[in-house]
Image (cartoon, rainbow, N blue to C red):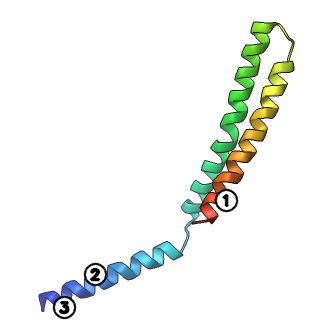
């Protein structure tokens, strides 16, 4: 009798686990968007700081800031694209 009860509980837990893996919740999608946001924003902000630093060191106006921000944008877009490509390939 104990074995049967244990088997039923394991089956119930397995069904709940499979159902939760199929059903994507609001928080699942929020997490994915949040990670994508950080992957995009961090290189842009790092580029802005690096460009500002180089402009101060080399007294070059804002040319390095703009260049590094654009490089950060390109790197951020690549990061997001690569992240979503890897996630969809699971």
Count residues near mark 1 (Cα–Cα under 10 Å), then give few for <14, some for 14-19, many for 20+.
Answer: few
Question: Are discs 2 and 3 less than 8 Å apart at CB?
Answer: no
Q: CA distance from mark 3 to mark 1?
A: 44 Å
- Check disc 2 and report the residue beneath it: 10
- What residue did someone put label 3 on? 4
Percent across and percent down for residue 53 are 72, 15
Q: Quadrant of residue 14?
A: bottom left
* Residue 55 sits above or below residue 49 on the image: above
Tell me the tag on residue 26: none
Viewed as shown, does residue 70 lie left or right of 38?
right
* Mark carried by residue 85: 1
| Quadrant of res 9 | bottom left
Q: CA distance from mark 2 to mark 1?
A: 35 Å
State which tag comes first along the sequence, 3 or 1.
3
| Label 2 or label 3, whichever comes before in sequence order | 3
Query: Can you give x and y, in whole percent of width and height, for residue 84 in the image?
Result: 66, 57
């Amino acid at each position: 009798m104990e074995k049967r009860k244990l088997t039923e509980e394991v089956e119930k837990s397995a069904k709940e686990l499979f159902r939760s893996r199929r059903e994507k919740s609001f928080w699942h999608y929020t997490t994915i968007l949040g990670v994508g946001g950080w992957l995009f924003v961090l290189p842009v902000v790092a580029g802005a700081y690096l460009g500002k630093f180089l402009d101060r060191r080399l007294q070059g106006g804002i040319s390095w800031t703009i260049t590094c921000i654009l490089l950060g944008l390109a790197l951020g877009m690549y990061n997001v694209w690569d992240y979503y490509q890897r996630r969809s390939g699971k």
